[in-house]
Amino acid sequence: EVQLQASGGGLVQAGGSLRLSCVVSGFTFDDYADYYIGWFRQAPGKEREGVSCISNSDGHTYNADSVKGRFTISSDKAKNTVYLQMNSLKPEDTAVYYCAADPLGCAAYSDYGISWKSYSMDYWGKGTQVTVSS
């Protein structure tokens, strides 16, 4: 059974940093290598949104416009762990952060732009709360 465990959330002041971790288990090594791991977040009263995604096969990453230049996703395959380094945090980054896995990607592309799979990734972990105070 595939499981994802997110951790690292907490309370931080605006301008500060946090690093989230997502430990992935239950994959065989070959299966895991073909998966995409993504970070999503959901603020109170809002829809879940995509934040960042990494391909385990080639390391390609992409980020939502709202976090470009501030958040960095990375992967340590030896530890089956994906990280989200969050710098220059803003109060609007406050949310529950989830990690998720899917073999086909974290988003779909069309003529209208990118659509994150905010509710349709194959596997989800429980979230970790990030609170940024002003």
Image (spheres, helix red, strand yellow):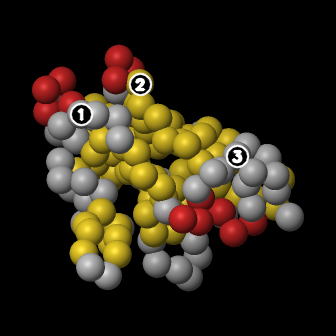
Mark 2 falls on what kind of element? Answer: strand
**Position of residue 23 in the picture relative to residue 93 (left or right):** left
Query: Which residue is denoted by mark 1 in the rendering?
Result: 57
State the CA–CA distance, disc 2 to disc 3: 20 Å
What amino acid type is highlighted by mark number 2?
Answer: Asp
Which residue: 35% across, 17% down? 78
The spot of residue 110 in percent (x, y) is 25, 75
Question: In the rendered image, which residue does mark 2 sit on?
Answer: 76
Q: Earlier in the sequence, mark 3 or mark 1?
A: 1
Image quarter of residue 95: bottom right
Q: Quadrant of residue 2?
A: top left
From the viewer's perspective, tell me whether residue 53 is left or right of residue 30.
right
Element under label 3?
Answer: loop
- Residue 39, how many percent across, how many down? 44, 52
Residue 87, numbered circle = 3
Q: Position of residue 31 (x, y in %)?
A: 14, 33
Figure check: 103 above or below 22: below
In what element is the residue under mark 1? loop
Residue type indicated by callout 3 = Asn
Q: Is residue 85 left or right of residue 29?
A: right
Depth order, front residue of 30/110:
110
